[in-house]
Structures are given as structure tokens and as C-alpha cells.
Amino acid sequence: MSGKLIATLYFYIISAGSLILIVIGIFNIVNFIINSTQYDKYPLRYPQGNCESYPNKFGGPYPAMDARGIPATPSAQELEKQKQECLKQENALSKQQKIDDLKNAITFTLVGLVLFLIHFPLARKQSNS
């Protein structure tokens, strides 16, 4: 293979890869817009459970036993405090997920666009000469 053919193939392969990045970026932008407009709270990538049934959110740990072997139960104030903490954590995770999704969408699109705008004209010039 000649050096010119290898250079042309390289530029076209990088151009194709950059088009894939652009498509992924556009998909992420559409996904971000849908998630931002169609849901009251931005959805989490991995469900965290339900804060309404907080102490046993995941069917999780068993209640602690006191010295007599009787299960200890949290007071109503403790349960409300735990529920509020759970809701606060869920809101923070939702906000962070929204920021991460927007960041990924912009990054994929811009990187793909820059790579395409650099490599595709060079590929065209290589194949024409």
C-alpha cells in the first residue's frame, strides 16, 4: 500500500468515527431534553428506591435489637429526619445526573464536530489529488 492510500484511509476512518461521536452526542441531547421536560424530577440512571418507605427502602437491614432481644424501632421524629435526608440525597443525585448528562451531550457533539471538520476536508483533498 502506498503512503497516500494509507493517509486517505486514516482520514476517512477518523471522519467516520467523528460522525459516530456526533450521532451519540445528538442522541444524548435529545435524551436530556426529554428527561428535562417530561419528568417532574430528572430521572436517575440507577433507581435509588422509594423514600416514602425509607427505613426499609430496599427491604434492607433488620432493625437493631436492644439488650432484651426486642427489636428497637426508631421514633417518628427519627423516621421523618431519615426521610428528609433521603429526599435531600435523591434531589442532589438528580441534579448531578442532569449536569452529567448535559456535559456528556455537549462533549460528544463538540469533539465529534471538531474531529470531523479537521479530518474530512483533508480526506477529500487526499482522495482528489
Image: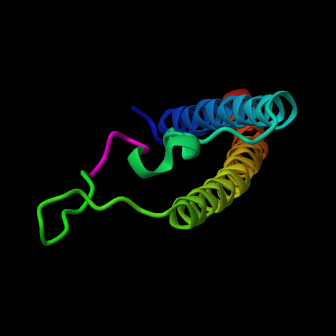
The residue most toward the front is: 68
The residue most toward the bottom is: 67
Q: Position of residue 124 (x, y in %)?
A: 74, 32
Which residue is nearer to you in this view: 86 or 128?
86
Figure quadrant of the N terminus: top left
Residue at the image point whose x is 75% and y is 49% from the top = 102
Q: Position of residue 27 (x, y in %)?
A: 71, 28
60 inside magenta stretch = yes
Quarter holding residue 2: top left
Residue at the image point whose x is 49% and y is 40% from the top = 49
Is residue 82 placed above or below 48 in the rendered structure?
Answer: below
Q: Position of residue 6 (x, y in %)?
A: 47, 37
Q: Position of residue 108 (x, y in %)?
A: 68, 45
Quarter holding residue 83: bottom right
Which residue is nearer to you in this view: 115 or 44?
44
Instruction: Please report the bounds of the magenta region as a residue range.
Output: 57-61
Residue at the image point whose x is 72% and y is 44% from the top = 105
Question: Total label count?
Answer: 0
Q: Main secondary structure of the magenta part?
A: loop
Residue at the image point whose x is 78% and y is 39% from the top = 121
